[in-house]
Image: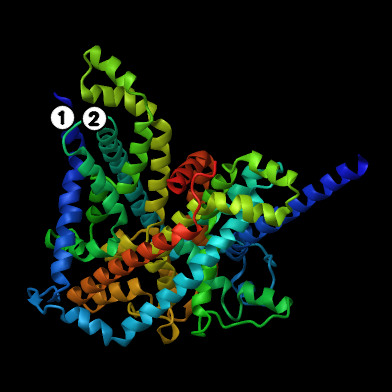
Amino acid sequence: MASTSRRYLGKRAGYHAILVLIAVGFLFPFAIMLFTAFKDPQDIFQSPQLLPRTWTVDNFGEAVRSMPYLRYVGNTLVLVVLNMLGTLLSCPLVAYALAKLRWRGRDGVFLSVLATMMLPPQITFIPLYLLWNEVGAVGTFLPLVIPQFLGTGFYIFLLRQFFAGIPDSLREAARIDGASELRIYLQIMLPLAKPALATVAVFQFVATWTDFLLPLIYLNDDSKYTLSIGLYSFFGEHGVQWGPLMAACVFFTAPAVIVFMIMQRYFVRGIAITGMK
Amino acid sequence: MSERRSGILFSSPWLVGLLVLTAGPVLASLYYSFTDFNVFESPEWVGLGNYAKLLGDDRFMTALWNTVYLTVFGVPLMLAFALLVALALNFPVRGQPLYRAIVYLPAIVPIVTATYLWRWMLNAQYGYLNQLLDLLHLPQPNWLDDPLWTKPAVLLVGFWGIGSTAVIYLAALKQVPQQLYEAAAVDGANARKRFWHVTWPAITPVTLFQLIMGIITSLQIFTQPYLLAQQRLNPAAGGPGDSLLTYTMYLYQNAFSFLKMGYASAMAWVLFAVILALTAIVLKTSKRWVHYGLD
């Protein structure tokens, strides 16, 4: 009896040892980012040492001063808010029509949603750029915002699967009471879909907050830059200012981490749905 | 309003987008790929000229090789690593959600931040990784300047971000019927046998899905190598000896630095063809190793 329980304890200690090792490995780069951000400039380029010799917040001040930090944050936030709004307006509406309404051509439209998910974005990238260029929108936020108001295939697919799981009886009862389709959608279906909407919202938040390629191609003016593009200003002609850069990276990463911690279960659910299909 | 009209009305944002942002551009791209087009003059028809030119383009071949390298080594290694991590996350201990959150955390770090952070850690002189290797008496490669080591550097950034793959594997592991393990234990199967005869067959469908998604993502890889190779005043940088020039990087260079829109469009279609072909091949072989309906 005693030996089994000791063996059990030993096994559990082994489990924890492995997990702690993994956790340390994944957290190590975060530690480097933080410690570098709090180091003195001389300290950074001196003998290897994990912790700062003297802790300083100068890098954070330098990060905010040396690039138009607040403007980049503002631009990024504007894009995040507009994209989330666009996605939450368009995607559930389309998803609901595909899951619950019966109309001719529905299956074809659903197929088109799946097809766009398979299409590599490189195919449409160049004509889209030329299109936005033609209407004079290159250099503005429009090419980054308008598409979200027209729906994203992946989110529509995710929400459609959710709506499909809601029993039809709810809809039929409301119809008998004389509710219009729009009212059924707004007052019954959307509130029921809150968890799925939260999943899509956090995905869109992270996607826009961290997006690099679209701002790189479309935002060619410093006043419109987002954080992902702006960080490059720390790469100077005479080397990289690692301290301020890492401080700016801390600023840039923190909101995503905070949103993740608060909304964790929605992330995990969304990932599980993507993976199990 | 009838259900039918509501259906179309509710879908109208998507239908507009489908027409203007997808269908139109797909056709335009196909057309451009048969033309010489520099934006300033109207496209000039060259037939299959762009496609033929690709074969004789050294930088294209380099970019193709680099991308194949990252995919062939990166995708299987990352899947294996994510599975190992998921197996550990599935240990029956308290604190599972905390460990899971820690593993997932790097996946939500802005990719720009993650790549710059690794650029710092991989710094040959002051970087922490080489100091760590020094402590372990291992060779310290010049990660970002030695063409031999730049691609492993890209893979390292990827390894740090395997969180979502691991979480998907973890969800699959939790769905393996417990009684199968009990039956295997009764038969006296050890841990390794239980893995190969119970766990692995049950998670092969998820592995297939992840393999295909991994291949597609990897063939399109852009941001990490772009940021590792990024140089002031040189938007067409490709790292030392072009060792970081990936397919998509070269495609965007052609389009936006050299304004060869037709050539870049042809590259996009070749990429699509490669993705379709590889997906088809993987699906075909999957009949031999993927097990469905164990439960």
- Examine the image and state in which quarter residue B192 appears: bottom right
Q: Is residue B180 above or below residue B133?
A: above
Q: Residue at x 62, y 43 (%)?
A: B97
Q: Residue at x 14, y 30 (%)?
A: B5
Q: Give whichever of A132, A244 is nearer the camera.
A: A132
Disc 2 marks which residue? A101
Q: Residues within 10 Å of mark 1 (few under 14, many from 20)?
A: some
Quadrant holding the C terminus of chain B: top right
Q: Amino acid at mark 1?
A: Arg
Residue A241 visible in the current orientation: no
Q: How many marks?
A: 2
Q: Residue at x 40, y 83 (%)?
A: B242
Across and down, in percent, residue A101 comes to 24, 29
Quadrant holding the N terminus of chain B: top left
Across and down, in percent, residue A226 comes to 36, 58
Distance between the Cα atoms at labels 1 and 2? 7 Å
